[in-house]
Amino acid sequence: MRVGLFVTCLVDLFRPTIGFAAVKLLEEAGCEVEVPSAQTCCGQPAYNSGDKGDAKDIARSVIETFEPFDFVVAPSGSCAGMIKTHYIELFADEPRWAQRSHDLARRTYELVSFLVDVCGLDAVDARYPGSVTYHDSCSGLRELHVKSQPRRLLASVRDLTLTELPGAEICCGFGGTFCIKYPEISTRMVADKVKDIQATGAGTLLAGDLGCLLNMAGRLRREGCDVKARHVAEVLAGMSDAPAIGDPTVSKLTS
Amino acid sequence: MQATSRNFKKNVHAAINDATLQRAMTKLGFQAARAAAVSRLPEFDKLRDQARDIKNHVLENLDLYLERYEAEMTRRGGQLHWCRTADEARAAVLEICRRLDAKIVTKGKSMVGEEIGINEFLEANGIAPVETDLGEYIIQLRHEPPSHIIAPAVHLTKDQVADAFLENHRQYGKTRRLEEAADLLAEAREILREKFIAADVGITGANFLIAETGSSVIVTNEGNGDLTQNLTKAHIVLATPEKLVPTLEDATTILRLLARSATGQEMSVYTTFSTGPRRGEDLDGPGEYHVILVDNGRTALLGTEFQDILRCIRCAACINHCPVYNTIGGHAYGWVYPGPIGSVLTPALIGIDEAGDLPNASTLCGRCESVCPMRIPLPKMLRHWREKEFEKGLAPKPFRTGLKLWAWFAKRPRLYHFGSRMAMKLLGILGRGRGSFRHLPLARGWTGGRDMPAPEGPTFQSLWAAERKSGRT
Amino acid sequence: MSEARDQILDGVRRALKRQAGDDVRKASVDGRISQHRRNLVPKRALLDHGAQIGLFVDMAEKAAATTARVAHYADIPDAVIDYLKRFNLPHKIKLAPDPALTGLSWTARPLLKIETGIAAPGDSASVTPAFAGIAETGTLMLLSGPTAPTTLNFLPENHIVVLTESRVVGPFEDAWDRARTAQRDGAWPRTVNFITGPSRSADIEQQLQMGAHGPRRLHIILVAEDGDGQGKG
């Protein structure tokens, strides 16, 4: 299976570790992975801001870039959801592009649900000692029905205990441009989320979307809370020795 | 009702810093109640599909259903008043009240009544409207609008209610400040009973209008709507065209969803179908039955990308499950309808210029759509409003510029990768000691409330390209 | 007014791209109404009649109504007195002017004061018939009429309802069918009340309390005998 990895702009810019974890998991599941360099973004920021023109331009180039692959996989429910459910809406009045969107949508998946639902994976070979809790990012959950799959794979990680997050399905307050436009509301939402995270007593927070993770990790750091935030792919791929999100990448001792 | 949606951000600031409001909001149990009720009805999801289809069918044939409804209700002694605007509706109500020399008018809860400001209008014309739904009564005493469409006083604590009663019930000889909720309820019951009996005209809303029989339907837990309509010379119903359903069976189907979605009850205590005035041989009931059919901008949504919002049955499930509503409460939205329904409907009814913030103050998390009994695609319609605002150039300039700039880069991969490599390398170096930034110029909205985690440094694309170059398979 | 009517209807037709006077569409709408087909009926109350009665009692009690079962109509006066005693209520009732109720031997219980007619403020308890009982949700269906004034359902502090077991149905749809059959020339009563438990409100800090404006208590006396002389309606 030839998989085109849709890296996502946030992973590309902020945390390549997640991209490499995704590649590792996909290759170990038997996929041949390529990362087209022509990709930048799925167009969601433009789409959610009402800028259909730019969203369409970006979507067309995503479709052209990724059409040749058997599958398109993204380590993000939000980006995968954009391609899988919203491109068709974008091109509702352009039949040819609508058709191409539809074809691509059928082959587009969020990473963990792809591993479980398409590759048939039900366990990974990884170890992560400690307790973790899991936040269900909104797009992955509601647009792509990603819920049981990450839990299934996490259950196979050695020495890991999963404590369910109360309100796991409640939005963390990121919402793309929302957190910049309505910072007061967003800050309160993420503060509430951090309260729930702390209440679990877990040492690590996991999720499938880097946007949510940057938001939650940022608040955890601001509150001086030492819960580690990682993308679920890092743990599943056994690549959890990288510093957690928001943690120093350089030891103060060695600089 | 006067809108303050323009001041959304100020409203939000006040709401988030209002400790009393925040405390009151912690008492809400609607989410758990709905989930429990849904789990007890295996057919719930199928019923949602059917309810959606019923309403879509009505909307597609609204002209015919309106005509049929009119025929059925008038042949059973009702009087239908077609009103295009709030002005016409208010005038129609006033004409009836004047003709009957009404001094006191009791009211059941009506959101369209709020829309058209019927209370202020009646007061200005020397008629005293008395809200009888307990929540509405409380906020009427406090001279404030409802903050929720089915639980109007949900933003208040018991103490605030006690204060309002103490201040306003002296005129009835009540001088003791009450502590217990039961005592507060008992006092309200006693006082409002007098009003029910003294009232000349009773006004209710309508959850449904039934074409088959020309009936209007109200749904309450208190019974105030029934006392309002049965003890007076006239029963006036404030209704809007999209409340129509074809038959009693169709109403029953949607009623199976309404209370469960709203409060988690199997059925509200009182569901009442009213058809015309009292009959010749009846011993009680209103002598006249009027339905004020107010359009006020609704039929203008037909045939547009907002048509689906007309399926709304005002259950408030979307409001109850919205994380933004649960953070800021209902008043912040600035008009009659809060939460997701409010964010779609308010711009439609009072204009996107006035209510521009509302469709944007959402993460599009989709929880609203997931609980809407009528399967209304709320996030899609919020996005439609954003598209309209973008077309009209209504978004704030810095955002539009920032977005355009980012999009320009995103369409040029080589420039994008080059530029992002530079920026992330710099941020990575600056941030690696601490791991995150407490302050970032141009990102004050973010760093006001949380740190910004530093990027790892090199971008994925640059690392991947380097790996390929070095011969990795 | 009719200018407003025309404008609204024209606006609707324009928006929907429909023509006025479309007989085919009108026939389909009229047909849908006259057929009044049932939509999906939940399985819950599709039981045999005995089980429906059991479900009705169960659901009504879950909604905070109280229930009692008697064999004959003649047992009703004693059942009413029992109820008033149980809650320490005054021994006076306002009775609906329904022959099936007024014809009972109330006078044999002189300590119970009876008045017949519509409700008055200060009425402590009313006794009314019910047209049907809907097992699906433990809901009473009451139709207004000369023998069933609606104010008796709302003004008194306590509402006692007499429900013949044969009038218990499973789903709401069965109740509507019976109600339709009971109407003459599609007349429909002024009021159809569906009542599920006593009046309540949670408007004060989400604390649920009984007796908001309607009756504080709802008591349902189920009568096995089909003695109300009105048949199945």
Image (cartoon, coloured by chain):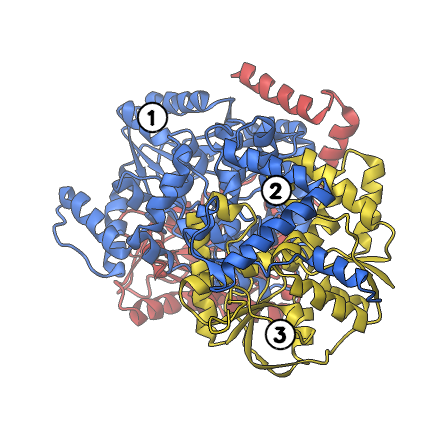
Across and down, in percent, residue C50 comes to 61, 71
Out of A210 and A148, give the one closest to the viewer.
A210
Disc 1 vs disc 2: which is toward the camera?
Answer: 2
Across and down, in percent, residue A45 comes to 62, 44
Left or right, residue C218 beside residue B49: left
Q: CA distance from mark 1 to mark 3?
A: 66 Å
Chain C representation colour:
red
Residue to which mark 2 is pinned: A48
**Label located before the other in sequence (2 or 3):** 2
| Amino acid at dot 2 | Asn
The single residue placed furthest to the bottom in the displayed view is A159
Out of B262 and A8, give the one closest to the viewer.
A8
Q: Are marks 1 and 2 in contact (CB under 8 Å)?
A: no
Residue to which mark 1 is pinned: B121
Chain B representation colour:
blue
Q: Which chain does the residue under circle 2 lie in?
A: A
Work out whether B105 lies above or below C211. Answer: above
Residue at image location 82% in from the left, 55% down from the top: A107
Across and down, in percent, residue C17 comes to 72, 24
Q: Which chain does the residue under circle 3 lie in?
A: A
The quadrant in which the C terminus of chain B is found is bottom right
| Amino acid at dot 3 | Ser
| Amino acid at dot 1 | Phe
Residue to which mark 3 is pinned: A240
Q: CA distance from mark 1 to mark 2?
A: 40 Å
10 Å crowding of disc 1: few (<14), some (14-19), many (20+): some
Give the structural element (helix, strand or loop) at label 2.
helix
Q: Are marks 2 and 3 in contact (CB under 8 Å)?
A: no
